[in-house]
């Protein structure tokens, strides 16, 4: 067996065999069939275009998406294999973003674990379930760096930091793809959205993005590079204009950076309808021109705009495109189908799915992942963990018993939310207590989401009247009044973040804060559990509620995991992968900014706004535990390191409290001068540790050219400067334990 590294650690089929079989296939395929491989057919009702069956039978389809039906997959595959001219099997693709049936915490939450094994194990299960259903390919991981919490899709990524984002990207690729693409429990991964989508103007979804090459290379691209290095099989181009060029027609991204510089050998699919939409964007003259631009830019597969199948023959006939150029784009698609073993095993086993979905270990991984993803934002006076012998607990809030908000955004087609809610989790944890519940007034988007129309069995309810809302408000206050302990579950519903779910404010929507204030005024102990897919500016809560747990959208076992943490059966250890701004208008807000011309804190030029602090409410990397930790004994292996050389940094972390717990040791650096100005702090290492009371562990980080170099505007290239550096190690991005070193020429 050939042990190639590409697309995983092993491959069951040799490079030579792949190449030879691709050649043989191309030799017998017509031009129309070759172009067909570049076409992804929409299997859902909302997708326009000719009937899927007809396209497939004619050899006009390489892949099908938006279908989630094992039997149907086999029917379509049979047409492809037995009735199409060259019998090339289809790839079935779907968005399996954080679980197929067993739902895991949303990607932003998984990043908050600061533990790459969380996304890796979760996506391993997601892949197993999806593959059992007959899917071959997921449109994940989504690895867009985002520093503007107004953008709804921040929920799908790993937050604001390229270093953390790169680690999470690679982990998800390993989870989806495993070591060998022929593994029948894995799916192809897709790194998206290439590139810059997280930087849309003011967080408005799909709006144009303007980013310098410096920002792209230092901040946006590192997770994509990490995905390539981890062997990701496919990429997806983004929707928006990047510096006035739509990402789907962007040669620089797809040819120069992705292929020439990074050596990517998989294929790129557009985002949905994005090739044809280059006409709407004002880039392409017409659909023919759009196809030409996509093909020339190196975009292999057209997701359902059918511009390629409509126009490629004419483009070749008129000499605008050569057949060799088409073949170059087809090759990696055929190669991946061969590597997956689809020619030998094109069909799904229709009896398998039920068996796989019944595996109890999948729910266990989900509960574990949710526990590890939660972030304890505040715990004044050690209110948490709560005692299990309390008699009367009120669980209050519109999300307390909301299954879809618990599972979070991005469900696969047909999935019925089946989460354990926080209410159910607390009831299961306290079988002998009286656990009461009141939702309070409903929350809803001012403008409904288009995705609601796609949800199984969804029928819109008329909005609550003001009288109904008042009654619900009063009922919630009375329920709280009768209890000894109140657990408020507030935040955003699943459709308040995600695609087409940006918002201008980051406040708790609806009357939630008012309800929180009314309940807090009762004088009972109140714990706030947040369910949300983006940072929220919970200023009042931060000032007045003693304990706040950020539970995100925690997945199928979310309510159990929340109860585990609230009642001390699990100890929180997650950390924020993105800072929480005090206001939506503070976005973009991120810790790795450059220093201004004036010293930090100088009264002459500060404050930066006159109407409030611009600092985050909770900083990047923040998160508490039920125990305490101390960092000490920070050492650098050498005071000076040569350009291109490496050094190590070590630190002792001690659990100084009374219970076992996890701490994430975080290493930040700052280069004091150089060819370009460098950020005040940049994360360059992290490790999540479990420590027993009194236990000390030494963590060692390596700093080499990869960590100390950067893309320089002045030098127009990757650069490493001889300069002095500060470094800090600690529990968040405000860490104070500091050391220095120098890079010398
Ligand atoms: C549009 C979204 O932007 C993308 O993330 C998704 O994968 C595709 N649609 C396919 O559903």
Image: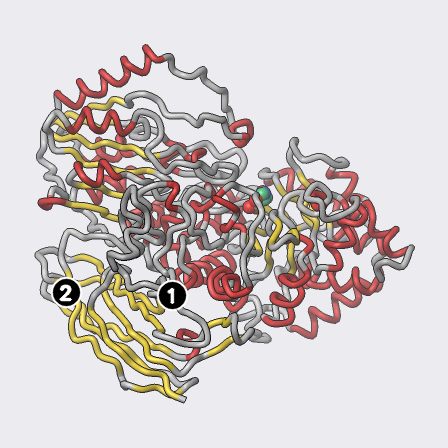
Q: Camera-side residue: 276 or 596?
A: 596
Tag of residue 149: none
Q: Residue 361, image x and y in percent?
A: 36, 49
* Residue occupied by mark 1: 679
431, above or below 462, in the image: below
Q: Camera-side residue: 635 or 34?
A: 635
Horizontal side of residue 484 vs 79, given as left or right: left
Q: Residue 384, image x and y in percent?
A: 14, 43
Task: Determine whether the residue tagged by mark 2 lies in a helix, strand or loop.
Answer: strand
| Residue 222 can be seen, yes or no | yes
Q: Residue 295, image x and y in percent?
A: 75, 56
Task: Determine whether the residue tagged by mark 1 lies in a helix, strand or loop.
Answer: loop
Within 10 angstroms of label 1, few (less than 14), some, or many (20 or more) residues? some
Horizontal side of residue 555 vs 474, given as left or right: right
Picture quarter with ligand 1: top right
660, above or below 218, in the image: above
N-terminal-most mark, 1 or 2: 2
Are dots 1 and 2 in contact, CB under 8 Å? no
Q: Residue at x 12, y 25 (%)?
A: 522
How did the renderer colour the structure?
secondary structure
Q: Quadrant of residue 673?
A: bottom left
Horizontal side of residue 662 vs 669, given as left or right: left
Tag of residue 630: 2
Depth check, mark 1 against mark 2: the one in front is 1
Q: Residue furthest front?
A: 604
| Quadrant placement of the N terminus | bottom right
Q: Which residue lies furthest to the top in this view?
A: 467
Q: Residue at x 84, y 59 (%)?
A: 321
Q: Camera-side residue: 520 or 353?
A: 520
């Amino acid at each position: 067996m050939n042990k190639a590294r590409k697309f995983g650690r092993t491959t069951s089929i040799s490079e030579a065999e792949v190449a030879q079989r691709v050649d043989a296939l191309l030799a017998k395929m017509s031009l129309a069939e070759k172009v067909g491989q570049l076409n992804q057919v929409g299997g859902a009702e909302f997708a326009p275009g000719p009937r899927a069956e007809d396209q497939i039978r004619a050899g006009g389809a390489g892949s099908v998406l938006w279908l989630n039906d094992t039997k149907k997959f086999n029917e379509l595959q049979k047409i492809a294999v037995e009735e199409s001219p060259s019998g090339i099997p289809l790839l079935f693709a779907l968005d399996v973003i954080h679980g197929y049936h067993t739902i895991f915490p949303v990607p932003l939450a998984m990043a908050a674990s600061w533990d790459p094994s969380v996304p890796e194990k979760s996506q391993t299960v997601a892949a197993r379930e999806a593959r059992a259903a007959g899917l071959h390919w997921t449109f994940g991981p989504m690895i867009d760096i985002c520093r503007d919490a107004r953008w709804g899709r921040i929920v799908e990524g790993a937050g604001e930091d390229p270093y953390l984002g790169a680690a999470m990207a690679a982990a998800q690729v390993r989870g989806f793809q495993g070591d060998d693409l022929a593994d029948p429990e894995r799916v192809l991964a897709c790194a998206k959205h290439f590139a810059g989508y997280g930087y849309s103007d003011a967080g408005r979804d799909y709006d144009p993005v303007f980013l310098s090459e410096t920002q792209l290379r230092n901040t946006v691209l590192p997770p994509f590079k990490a995905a390539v290095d981890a062997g990701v099989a496919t990429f997806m181009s983004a929707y928006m204009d990047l510096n006035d060029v739509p990402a789907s027609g962007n040669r620089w991204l797809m040819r120069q950076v992705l292929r020439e510089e990074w050596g990517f050998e998989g294929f790129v699919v557009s985002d949905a309808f994005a090739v044809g939409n280059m006409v709407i964007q004002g880039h392409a003259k017409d659909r023919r021109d759009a196809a030409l631009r996509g093909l020339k830019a190196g975009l292999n597969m057209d997701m359902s705009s059918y511009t390629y199948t409509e126009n490629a023959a004419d483009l070749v006939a008129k000499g605008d495109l050569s057949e060799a150029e088409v073949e170059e784009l087809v090759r990696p698609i055929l190669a991946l189908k061969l590597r997956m073993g689809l020619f030998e095993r094109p069909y799904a086993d229709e009896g398998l799915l039920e068996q796989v979905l019944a595996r109890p270990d999948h729910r266990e991984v989900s509960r574990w992942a949710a526990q590890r993803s939660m972030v304890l934002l505040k715990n004044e006076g050690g209110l948490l963990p709560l005692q299990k012998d309390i008699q009367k607990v009120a669980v209050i809030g519109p999300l307390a018993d909301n299954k879809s908000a618990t599972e979070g955004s991005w469900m696969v087609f047909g999935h019925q939310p089946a989460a354990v809610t926080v209410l159910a989790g607390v009831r299961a944890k306290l079988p002998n207590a009286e656990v009461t519940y009141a939702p309070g007034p409903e929350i809803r988007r001012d403008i409904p989401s288009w995705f609601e129309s796609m949800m199984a069995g969804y029928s819109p309810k008329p909005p609550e009247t003001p009288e109904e809302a008042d009654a619900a408000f009063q009922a919630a206050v009375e329920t709280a009044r009768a209890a000894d302990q109140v657990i408020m579950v507030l935040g955003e519903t699943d459709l308040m973040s995600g695609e087409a779910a940006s918002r201008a404010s980051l406040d708790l929507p609806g009357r939630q804060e008012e309800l929180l204030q009314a309940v807090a005024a009762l004088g009972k102990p109140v714990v706030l559990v947040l369910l949300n897919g983006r940072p929220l500016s919970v200023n009042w809560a931060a000032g007045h509620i003693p304990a706040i747990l950020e539970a995100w959208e925690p997945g199928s076992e979310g309510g159990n995991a929340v109860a585990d943490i609230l009642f001390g059966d699990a100890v929180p250890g997650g950390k924020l992968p993105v800072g929480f701004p005090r206001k939506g208008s503070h976005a973009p807000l991120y810790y790795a900014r450059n220093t201004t011309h004036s010293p930090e804190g100088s009264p002459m030029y500060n404050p930066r706004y006159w109407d409030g602090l611009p600092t985050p409410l909770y900083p990047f990397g923040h998160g508490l535990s039920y125990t305490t930790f101390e960092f000490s004994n920070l050492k650098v292996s050498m005071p000076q390191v040569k350009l291109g050389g490496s050094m190590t940094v070590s630190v002792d972390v001690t659990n100084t409290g009374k219970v076992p717990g996890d701490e994430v040791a975080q290493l930040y650096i700052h280069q004091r001068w150089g060819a370009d100005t460098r950020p005040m702090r940049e994360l360059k290492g992290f490790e999540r540790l479990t420590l027993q009371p009194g236990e000390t562990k030494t963590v060692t980080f390596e700093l080499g050219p990869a960590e100390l170099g950067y893309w320089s505007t002045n030098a127009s290239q990757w650069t490493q400067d001889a300069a002095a550096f500060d470094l800090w190690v600690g529990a968040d991005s405000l860490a104070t334990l500091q050391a220095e070193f120098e890079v010398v020429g």
